[in-house]
Image (cartoon, rainbow, N blue to C red):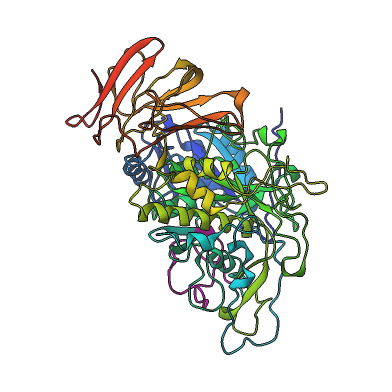
Amino acid sequence: MARKTTKITSEGGGQPQLIALAKPQAALRAGAENTIISIAGASTDPTQKVLDKYKAVLKPLFGPTEERVTALVGRQAAEASAPLAELSGFYKVQAEEKDLEKIQKDLLDGGLFDAAYIKPGTEDPVEINTMTAVADPAPSSTPDFTARQIYLNAAPEGINARWAWQQAGGRGHGVHIIDIENAWRFTHEDLLEKQGGLLGGDEFITPTSGDHGTAVLGEYGGDVNGFGVTGISPNAITSAVSHRGLGSAGAINHAATRLVAGDVMLLEMHRPGPRHNFQWRQDQKGYIAVEWWPDDYAAILNATRRGIIVVEAAGNGAEDLDDAIYDTRPLGFPADWTNPFRRNNRDSGAIVVGAGAPPPGTHGRDHGPDRSRLGFSNYGALIDAQGWGREVTTCGYGDLQGGDNADLWYTDRFSGTSSASPIVTGAIACLQGMAKARGRAVFNPMELREALRTTGSPQQDAPGRPRTQRIGNRPDLPPLAQHLFPAGGNKRGIAFRRSVEQWRPLEMRAFIDISPQLTAAHTTGVLQAALVSAQSLSVGTADLDELGILFRVSALSGQAVEIAGPVGGDRYRYWGIIAADGLGRLFVDEGFSSTGSDKCDLIAEIQGVDRRFVFDDALQRYREV
C-alpha cells in the first residue's frame, strides 16, 4: 500500500526540519565528511547512498557528537527526579527543502531508524500582534506606565504582583528565566539592569522582529527605575535562546544546560498541527504547543525532571487539544508514540498556559467577560493556568510610545498566549524567589502546577466560549503563597523517582519526619496507588533509596481531601489534593516532627505487611529495621 504523505510548508515561519530517531541497537555515529557508521556492525550503505544522493547531512540534534550528548545526559541524571530520555539517537537531516519527503521515505525504509518525521517551521505566536509604532517622537523622559499594567494589581483583575514585591525574595531574586523564541531588543531602555542577553541560537533580525521578544521580557523583567513598565519579577535574571539555527528542541536543550532546579524556561513558540495538514497559515489557525513532537517532548521532559520549570504557550490555534485528532500518530513518528496532550498517556512536566480576557474596559476596549477564554486560545484538560491575552502594557511595538528609536517603544496591546505565558512565568519566579529567601528548597514543576490549578481567580463563561473550554485560573500570588508556604512549615510535595511504576490497590500508613531525602505522608484506606522508588520495590525489598506515593481516585476528581494525622493532635499535619484528572498528591508539613530530630522514621503497612524504615547516615538511604 502506498504511504500517505503530507507536504509541509513554511511560508513566513522557520524552516521545516527532518528529524530522525535511530534504532538503539544500530549504535549509529555521524562521522566526518558526511559519513555514517554503526559501531554495532549494522549495514549503513543504503542510508549512506541516500545522504549522498541528496547531498544531505546527518548530524546529532542535541550536540556535536553522540558521545558528548550521552555524557551530558549522564551528568544531568544525577540531579534528576526520574530517569532522563536518551537523546543521542535523535538526528537532524540538513537538505534542500524540496527533497525532505523523499529522504524521509528512504530513511523509514532503510532499517536503521525508528522514526523520521518532518516538523513544520517553528513560529512565534505573533499574528494577532499587528501594532505599528506611532510617528510622534518619544518625549525627553519616558512616563511611568505602571498604572496601565493592571495585571500587576490585586485579584481578580491581576495576579497581585505588588503584594509579592513586599515579601522577601518576592521580586524573583536568585531566579534565572530564559525565553525561547526568535529575537529581542536587549538595548531597550527598560531592559538593562538584570538581563543576561542571548545565550544561544541566531536571532532573525528585521526592523520589527525583536518586538515580540522585547514585549515578553518587559512583562516579567522590566526594570524598577521610575519610568516605563515594571516587570512582575524584576529581580530575576532574564536571558534568551533563539530557536533559529538550533531548532525548537535544540534550543530547549541548550537553554536547559544554562539553568538549575527552580529556574524557569519560557517557550514562546508554536507550529502548525494536523488540523490543517501541518500547513503554514497567515491566521495561525490549528497551531499547537510544541511538545506534541517527539524531540521537543524529550527535551522538555529532561528539563522538568531536573527541576527546571518549563512554561509553555498553549498556542493561538483556537484548537480543542482534547480532540481525537491529536491521538493519531503522524507518518514517521515512533511506533510507541502516544499523545502527550493526554497526560494519562505521558506527561512532559510543562506548565501550559492559555489566554484569557482582561477586565472589560481595560484601555477602553472590551474582549468579553474577565478571565473568559479568548477565541484564538487553544484549550483543553492540558492547560494549567491562564494569563492576560489582550491589552498587556509592556515594552516594544511603539503603539503607546513610538518615534524613530525602537529602544524607547512601549505597547498597550500585546496579545495572545504570547502575552499570557509571561504573566504565569513572572508569578512562578516570584514564588521561587520567596522560597529562596525563606531558606526553603525551590518548588518543583509538579508542586507549582498543582498550586496553579488549585488556587487563583476562576475562568468565566463567555458567549460561545464556556468555561468548560478549559484555560484554567488566573494566578493570584497571595493564595498561591499560602498554599505553598502554610503556617507552621513548608508544604512540600512527595519526593519520587519514576524508575518503577506499578498501579495496584494498596493501603499505606506512614509516620514521617523532616528529611532532605524523603517526604511522605499518611493515608487511611485502600487507594489505587503507585509506589515509585529509585530501585525496584516489592514487598520483599529491604532497602529503599526514596519512597513516594501517588494515588488515583476517579470518584473524587477535582476535590480537596483532608487527611488526619496518625496520632492526632497538632504534631502531624497532612494535606491531600485530588486534581481534575483524579491524580492525587500528598503533602506533609515539615514544621512538625515525631522524634524532634532532623531524620526521618517511616512506619508503613503495605498489603498487611508491617515494615519499618529508618534513614541510615552511613548508607545515605533508608533501610528496613
Which residue range is magenta in the image?
179-205
Name the residue at 27% across, 17% down.
Answer: 542
Q: Quadrant of residue 591?
A: top left
Q: Which is nearer the eye, 312 or 243? A: 312
Among all residues in the image, which is located at the extreme front? 569
Q: Quadrant of residue 387?
A: bottom right
Name the residue at 63% across, 65% down.
Answer: 150
Quadrant including the C terminus: top left
Residue 296 located within the stretch drawn in magenta:
no
As drawn, 146 above or below 139: above
Q: Quadrant of residue 604?
A: top left
Instruction: Determine if residue 602 is in view.
Output: yes
- Give how far across and how far down residue 622 sits, in percent: 26, 26
Among all residues in the image, which is located at the extreme bottom? 140
Q: Which is nearer the eye, 149 or 139? A: 149
As drawn, 189 above or below 287: below
Among all residues in the image, which is located at the extreme right? 463
Magenta segment's dominant SS is loop
Among all residues in the image, which is located at the extreme top? 608
Q: Is residue 169 left or right of residue 584?
A: left
- Give how far across and how far down residue 372 sits, in percent: 73, 50
Quadrant including the N terminus: top right
Instruction: Determine if residue 244 is in view.
Output: no
Name the residue at 60% across, 26% down.
Answer: 556
Q: Is residue 505 left or right of residue 277?
A: left
Q: Is residue 2 left or right of residue 291?
A: right
- Give how far across and how far down residue 537 sits, in percent: 36, 19
